[in-house]
Amino acid sequence: MKKKYGAGEKDILPKQDSLETIAAEVLTCTKCLLSKTRKNAVPGEGHLNAKVIFIGEAPGYWEDIKGRPFVGDAGKFLDSLLSEIGFSREDVFIGNVLKCRPPGNREPQPSEVQACTPYLDRQIKVIQPRVIVTLGNYSTAYVFSKGGLAFTSITKVHGKFYDVSLLGMKVTVFSTFHPAAALYYPKYKQLIIEDFKLLKERLEKEGIITY
Ligand code: URA
Ligand code: SF4
């Protein structure tokens, strides 16, 4: 069959990335040692054209078993927060900084974050969201660094909107505490609920939630 382009050129044409391609790569990824201890990698899931992306830290016990993000107790709380602002999981994209569970839910290591975040970057680029919501310290620190913002602590930056240029696009970054924190400390639960109210107001103002 006749080719549309000259010999050799086909190889250098950029292939279009997709959430499916990224997920397939994640499922078999061995770029860091977490691949040895995971049961299932958790690529993340949601709408291809989501206007809002939520980013957590890493899979926990249930996520590792099921291969899906936020399906344990923290996930139930996240579901209720989403429904409070008029979203179901299918309307948004939910992902994590790390795609594999750190043993015993220990904190992510810098080398793991470095190995894994190219997947997150690609997911963000494919989806092109208007708003990125970071949940907890790790995703906030990562997204802030990508957006050229100085990250101090989640206590200082949560509940605020930052318009930034990130991965070549204009997005609004909004951070709150990790939903798992709310399960241990009632104080954080209340703060997260208040942050989500601010998020809802902003999304309504921008016409992202319409009802
Ligand atoms: N905590 C996270 O950060 N991500 C999950 O997917 C589940 C719990
Ligand atoms: Fe690959 Fe990320 Fe899993 Fe490490 S955590 S093995 S980089 S998918």
Image (cartoon, grey):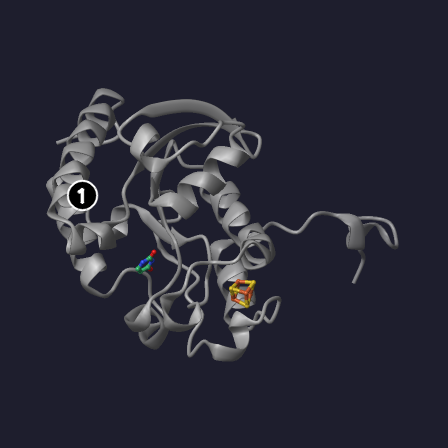
- Where does the N terminus fall, quadrant-wise? bottom right
The residue type indicated by label 1 comes to: Tyr
Q: Residue at x 79, y 55 (%)?
A: 11
Judge by depth and name the residue closer to the eye, 47 or 116. 116
Q: Name the residue under label 1.
A: 188
Judge by depth and name the residue closer to the eye, 98 or 47. 98
Q: What secondary structure is marked by label 1?
A: helix
Q: Where is residue 114 in the image (x, y as percent from the top left)?
A: 59, 53
Q: In terms of image quadrants, where is residue 152? A: top left
Above-or-below relation of 83 to 29: above
Q: Where is residue 147 in the image (x, y as percent from the top left)?
A: 51, 30
Asked if the residue at label 1 sits under 8 Å from ligand 1, the reply is: no
Above-or-below relation of 146 to 68: above
Q: Residue furthest right?
A: 7
Q: Residue at x 53, y 46 (%)?
A: 121
- Label 1 crowd (10 A; few <14 / some 14-19 / many >=20): some
Q: In terms of image quadrants, where is residue 119? A: bottom right
Q: Which residue is drawn at 14% across and 33% down?
A: 194
- Where does the C terminus fall, quadrant-wise? top left
Instruction: Name the side, left or right, on which 1 lies relative to 95.
Output: right
Judge by depth and name the residue closer to the eye, 110 or 68. 110
Q: Position of residue 128 (x, y in %)?
A: 46, 37
Instruction: Name the side, left or right, on which 192 lies relative to 148.
Output: left
Q: In which quarter of the image is ligand 2?
A: bottom right
Q: Residue at x 16, y 50 (%)?
A: 185
The count of marks equals 1
Above-or-below relation of 163 to 39: above
